[in-house]
Amino acid sequence: MINLVVLSLYDFKYKAVPDYLLLFAFFSSFFITKFDIFEALQSAFIISGAFVILNFLVTFYIQNIKSRFLKDESLKTQTALGEGDIPLIASFGVILGVYNTFIAIFLSAIVAMFYAIYLKNRKNEIEIPFIPFLVFGFLLEYFFNLSNIFKDFY
């Protein structure tokens, strides 16, 4: 858990995180998981694969379609997720499993969206560090198991 706080603070300050902290988070997640190693690895691969594809599609949209439509060349260098987000999401997949990780990411995105709106109105910034929000969503799901509330809706 301390590593998650360090990752969050590092991402807030530099908007990037060192690979060794991400590797430590990934490998230490196998000691926390309630799943067997093969199920944990399967969850990590499903989650990270899904977000690699999603990142590619959204980045392609931003860099090619949106930049041409808005005629804004600065969008050609933007990405949807940073390189550090996907290994951390895989770590969460190891600990929480596929469904609960998607819930944690959903919660993270909602909180990050409000923060991004605040920054856009206040400082006119576009880039936000996403790891602190991922950690927040993970902690909410890990300690409070909010996925049970979402299961009751359907």
Image: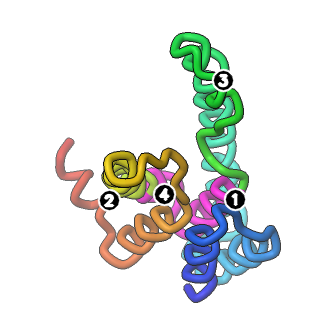
**Proximity of marks 4 and 3: CB atoms separated by less than 8 Å:** no
Residue 102's label in the rendered image is none
Of mark 4 and mark 1, the one earlier in the sequence is 1
Q: Quadrant of residue 93?
A: bottom right
- Which tag is nearer the camera, tag 2 or tag 1? 1
Of mark 2 and mark 1, the one earlier in the sequence is 1
Q: Residue at x 33, y 69 (%)?
A: 145
Residue 13 visible somewhere in the drawing: yes
In magenta stretch: residue 103: yes
Q: Secondary structure at mark 3?
A: helix
10 Å crowding of disc 3: few (<14), some (14-19), many (20+): few
Residue 84's label in the rendered image is 1
- Which SS does the magenta portion mostly show? helix
Kind of residue at badge 2: Ser
Residue 147's label in the rendered image is 2
Between the C-alphas of marks 3 and 2, the distance is 40 Å
Q: Secondary structure at mark 1?
A: loop
Per the rendered image, the range of residues in magenta is 84-104
Between the C-alphas of marks 4 and 3, the distance is 34 Å
Tell me the residue that label 4 is attached to.
Answer: 101
Residue 73's label in the rendered image is 3
Q: Is residue 98 above or below residue 61?
A: below
